[in-house]
Image: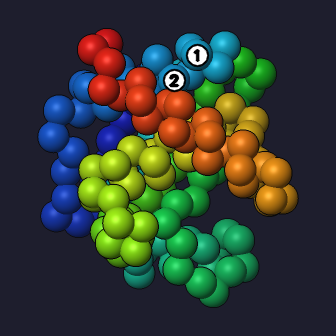
Amino acid sequence: MVDFNYQFNFELSKELDYSKWLEAVAVSEQKSIGDLSYVFCTDDFLLELNKKYLDHDTLTDIITFDYCDDYLIHGEIYISVDRVKDNAKDFNVTFNDELLRVMVHGLLHLCGYGDKSDFEKSYMRSKENEKIKMFHVKQ
């Protein structure tokens, strides 16, 4: 089950469309979603989590907590809507496209993909692009 939570005045429209897409992404990676929670928050909220749990004193667009069990996806994905807005401007893409990228980025981490090395970053980006295209396909 995909659950969406909001820490401030932001809300996804058509949550069911996002849930169906994320479930389809998981299936395309031979996984199944157990309990997956997305929390949409501010820069300040995510910065505090970054400091507390990762000992990083920097802004980030996403933090993923992985509680997966083999093929079953369990996790919490925190997304800074502030960062998504700024990144969309910086990358010259729409807010919605950048939001999809960040949402699927977190899910891909839970599917086992990393992004530490240059190769991993490049592969992750190709996977993100592949999965974003799935959102526009009627589920």
Q: Is residue 24 above or below residue 122?
A: above
> The N terminus lies in which quarter of the figure?
top left
Image quadrant holding the C terminus, namely: top left
The image shows residue 118 at horizontal and vertical percentages of: 80, 59
From the viewer's side, name the closer residue of 118 and 31. Answer: 118
Mark drawn on residue 25: 2
Could you tell me the amino acid type at mark 2?
Val
How far, Cα to Cα, is label 2 from label 1?
5 Å
Q: Residue furthest front?
A: 92
Q: Quadrant of residue 34?
A: top right
Which residue is at 43% across, 59% downward? 79
Q: Is residue 39 above or below residue 82?
A: above
SS at mark 1? helix
What percent of the width, then of the height, locates residue 80? 40, 66
Residue shown at the point (82%, 51%) measured from the top left: 119
Can residue 67 be seen from the camera position used here?
no
Residue 5, above or below 49: above
Q: Which amino acid does the dot numbered 1 rest on?
A: Ser
For the question of whether residue 3 can be seen, the reply is yes
Q: Which residue is mark 1?
A: 28
Circles 2 and 1, Cβ within 8 Å, touching? The answer is: yes
What is the secondary structure assignment of the residue under circle 2? Answer: helix
